[in-house]
Image (tube, rainbow, N blue to C red):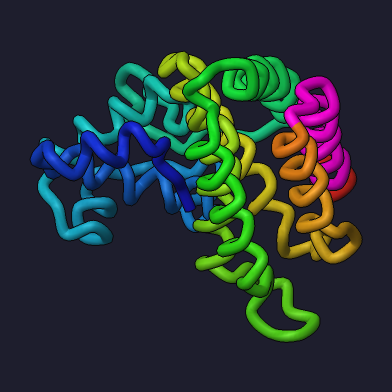
Amino acid sequence: MTTTPPAERASARTAPRTMASMLADSIRSDIIAGTLAPQSKLRLKDLAVRYDAGVIPLREALSRLAMTGFVKAEDQRGFSVTGVSLQELLDITETRKRIETDALRNAIANANGGIDWESQVLSSYYRLSQLPMFLGEGSDTLNPDWEEEHGQFHATLLSGCTSSWLQRFAHMLRDQGTRYRLLSLCKGHEHCRDVMAEHKRILDAILARDTERACQLLEQHLDETMRLVLKQIA
């Protein structure tokens, strides 16, 4: 499940969406959720039936996804879902830590990350805290409402940043990281950590305007996710 930065959500409400854009979102969501498995072939004929769409917008959607790393395009061989690897997960996490901590420092330091931003972060955390992470006691089935709010919480953390490019890169990397995390959820790794407590510590540091602690806690949060995913896919 994907999330959209607040600024992009606002512009999206005023701009008409093309069929290719909507297809790209649907296919990306299915890749992130693991419904379309890593390295699986993306045959246009099959996708046309699955998404009830024409070949031309599907080809455009897949070309867009190839530019963001979710789809692999090969001459004469068509499209396939990009594979996963331990090295890529490490690379995604390390890059994400640099991008997100830079964005968070910017948000805390600048007026753009003022009281309105703090209120949005607090509100996002509260909404997330009211939802169960899984569907049922002892279940490994992720609650889609929780996952949506979880993505929005992380997007809101960075929404006070004055750099739209930092936010865009963070959004792309967050989607890539979510793909890895969801691929391992069937192993139940999230049950062995208190994710909401990690979020609360980040929130408290932000409200205290303790930049270094907030960034350190965010890095630890991302590292812990990586560590648990590595245990399951290694």
Q: Residue at x 51, y 20 (%)?
A: 111
Q: Residue at x 59, y 70 (%)?
A: 143
Question: Looking at this rendering, what residue extends furthest in the front direction?
Answer: 115
| Residue 86 in sight here | no
Q: Position of residue 75 (x, y in %)?
A: 33, 17
Left or right for 143, reference 66? right
Q: Position of residue 92 (x, y in %)?
A: 67, 24
**Taken as a whole, is the magenta stretch helix, strand or loop?**
helix
Of the pair 88 and 97, the residue shown nearer to us: 97
**Where, quadrant-wise, is the C terminus in this rendering?**
top right
Left or right for 173, reference 219? left
Left or right for 6, reference 111? left
Q: Quadrant of residue 89?
A: top right
Left or right for 22, reference 67? left
Answer whether residue 228 is magenta in the image: yes
Of the pair 45 and 226, the residue shown nearer to us: 226
Answer whether residue 99 is magenta in the image: no
Q: Which region is colored magenta?
A: 209-229
Q: Position of residue 24 (x, y in %)?
A: 29, 40
Q: Residue at x 31, y 33 (%)?
A: 8
Q: Position of residue 168 (x, y in %)?
A: 44, 23
Q: Residue at x 73, y 28 (%)?
A: 209
Q: Quadrant of residue 141?
A: bottom right
Of the pair 95 and 104, the residue shown nearer to us: 104
Of the pair 219 and 61, the residue shown nearer to us: 219
Q: Is residue 177 above or below residue 209?
A: below
| Residue 224 in sight here | yes
